[in-house]
Amino acid sequence: MPQKKSNKKVKWISHYTNNQRILLVGEGDFSFSDCLARAFGSATNMVASSLDSERALKTKHWTSQAHLQSLWSRGCLVLHGVNVHDMDRHPTLSQMKFDVIIFNFPHAGHSPLLCEQDTKLIERHRKLLEAFLKNGREMLGEGGEVHVTLRDDHPYNQWNVMGLADKLGLVLKEKVEFLKQDFPGYHNKRGGGVKSNKKFPLKECFTFKFCLAKSPANQFSEVGNDPSGIVAALDKLNFSS
């Protein structure tokens, strides 16, 4: 069970700290997880997971072994065979709540018959994103966030992550540029079974940070006795003209 480190010095890397309970899904060679763990000096606040089995990783991402050893040595819980389509029902993860759930560069897989511009493949990507956002929101602790990092140029911007999140009651808290150099040792991997351990070009990339929309009750609780605040809350709820 990942633990918050409330009594220890807070260590940061970009927008992540060792005081957050962090779940990483869809890891390739686990280099991103390892990057965070090394920055924190410990990984007892982290769960790092892959869709691939541990056996498959040795073939698809042979560079993963050193990163896994590093994570284990720092106390990280590593899980394999975690599918975002049902991760909220995973026997281990279903017992946990997280402050941040991270999915970097999700991809529904490559096909020799389809290119990234094909509508059929774009729809597969959308379904993958929707499953992550839908199930991830159920695993958040109070004030938690789901982070998804994507290329934001064509055709990847056709995946419509903003629209999918809005449909699921998630609100964009922040959209920040993703810079690989901010995460020393991280290597983005293709995955998907085709040249899996190769890198792919990172162009216009951003991390989308989503949080749960506030309920009407919570919105009113923040208003207090300020009449102007009441009007603002009503505007948000579309109750005022």
Image (spheres, helix red, strand yellow):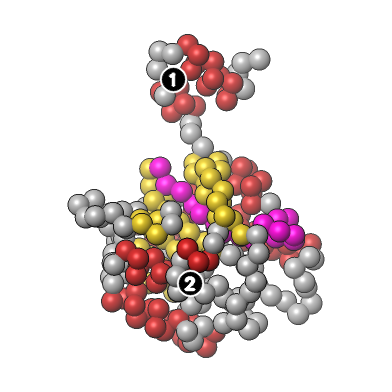
Give the image location of residue 8, x and y in percent.
21, 55
Could you tell me the amino acid type at mark 1? Val
Q: Considering depth in this image, is 223 or 82 the residue closer to the camera?
A: 223
Q: Kindly state the secondary structure of the residue where label 1 is placed.
A: loop
Quadrant of res 48: bottom left
Residue, disc 1: 223
Residue at 49%, 86% (x, y): give it: 62
Crowding near the residue tagged with mark 1, few <14, some 14–19, many ≥20 C-alpha atoms within 10 Å: some
Residue 29 as seen in the image, left or right of residue 121: left
Front-most of residues 113 and 91: 113
Q: Amino acid at mark 2?
A: Tyr
Residue 208 vs residue 221, the one in the foreground: 208
Q: Quadrant of residue 155?
A: bottom right
Left or right of residue 237: residue 37: left
Residue 127, given in percent of the width and then of the height, sits at 65, 59
Element type where label 2 sits in the image: loop
Q: Which residue is mark 2?
A: 186
